[in-house]
């Protein structure tokens, strides 16, 4: 299983990055392959809004969004992680979300079967931020019980690390994503077994 985390915090040693690292480490320990993309390290421009995506084979903007979206679509599980900035996701995360419009306009589906959401605020705005990310995650057609959410309060760099409940929740999220994905795989393979033609059956006539 491959998990890709998209991080909307520009603070590489900040709270969100720390919690994402905890989740990914745990996921690796139970067998997942993981990757983290910190959006501020790349060029992901805001959507231009011409609404003509369908007329073009690729997005007109030749920045890093293209390859990031390719990886995002191919992952078995995705984590969306952001600090709360003015009661919602950071600008980096919003730009990334909007750039998914190209995929939507081309009816390109997502491979993710499980989703993780991690949100950190100093004191206010977690609900609205979660709402934004959950609405976006609806695009993936993932069952509600396969969306795992961790949110909490931290402000200065290093605060999240001291919040042991939050740290444990982030670790749990990593493991839950892998467990949940494995169950989905088992159900799919059992279903395929059932569908296999019975080769011992004598054909009629
Ligand atoms: C531009 C900006 C806007 C912010 N807006 C909010 C806010 O609306 N509500 C809140 O509780 N915290 C707000 N914060 C605080 C951050 O959410 C908080 O410091 C968080 O821990 C940052 O995560 P990070 O360390 O991963 O960057 C804001 C911080 C910045 C820099």
Image (cartoon, rainbow, N blue to C red):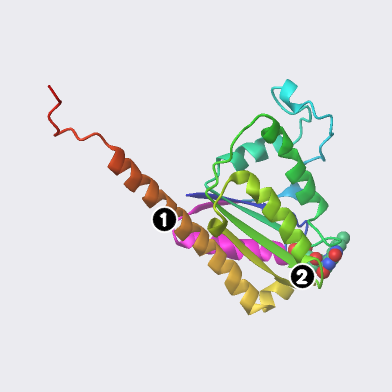
Answer above or below: position of 173 versus 61: below
Residue 82 visible from this viewpoint: no
Residue holding disc 2 = 157
Q: Is residue 32 left or right of residue 20?
A: left
Query: Toward which corner of the image does residue 195 lie, by quadrant?
Result: top left
**x and y, in percent, of residue 41 in the image:** 75, 48
Q: Residue furthest right?
A: 86
Quarter of the rendered image showing ligand 1: bottom right
Answer above or below: position of 141 versus 203: below
Residue at the location (65% across, 50% down)?
137
**x and y, in percent, of residue 125 in the image:** 80, 66
Which secondary structure, mark 1? helix
Label annotation for residue 183? 1
Magenta-colored span: 15-35
Answer above or below: position of 156 versus 194: below
**Mark nearer the viewer, 2 or 1:** 1
- Per the picture, the main secondary structure of the magenta-coloured stretch is helix
Label annotation for residue 91? none
Q: Is residue 44 left or right of residue 199?
A: right
**x and y, in percent, of residue 116 in the image:** 60, 57
- Does the residue tagged 2 have its C-beta within 8 Å of any atom of ligand 1? yes
Neighbours of disc 2 within 10 Å: few (<14), some (14-19), many (20+):
some
């Amino acid at each position: 299983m491959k998990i890709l985390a998209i991080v909307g915090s520009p603070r590489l040693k900040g709270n969100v990055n720390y919690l994402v690292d905890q989740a990914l480490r745990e996921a690796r320990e139970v067998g997942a392959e993981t990757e983290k993309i910190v959006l501020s390290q790349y060029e992901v421009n805001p959507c231009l809004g011409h609404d003509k995506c369908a007329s073009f084979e690729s997005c007109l903007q030749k920045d890093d969004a293209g390859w990031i979206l390719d990886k995002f679509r191919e992952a078995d599980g995705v984590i969306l992680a952001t600090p709360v900035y003015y009661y919602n996701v950071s600008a980096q995360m919003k730009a990334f979300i909007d750039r998914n419009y190209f995929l939507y306009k081309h009816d390109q589906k997502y491979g993710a079967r499980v989703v993780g959401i991690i949100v950190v605020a100093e004191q206010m705005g977690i609900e609205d931020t979660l709402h934004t990310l959950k609405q976006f995650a609806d695009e993936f057609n993932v069952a509600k019980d396969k969306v795992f959410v961790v949110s909490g309060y931290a402000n200065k760099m290093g605060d999240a690390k001291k919040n042991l409940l939050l740290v444990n929740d982030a670790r749990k999220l990593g493991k839950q994503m892998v467990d949940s994905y494995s169950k989905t795989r088992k159900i799919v393979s059992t279903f395929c077994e059932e569908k296999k033609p019975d080769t011992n059956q004598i054909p009629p006539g």
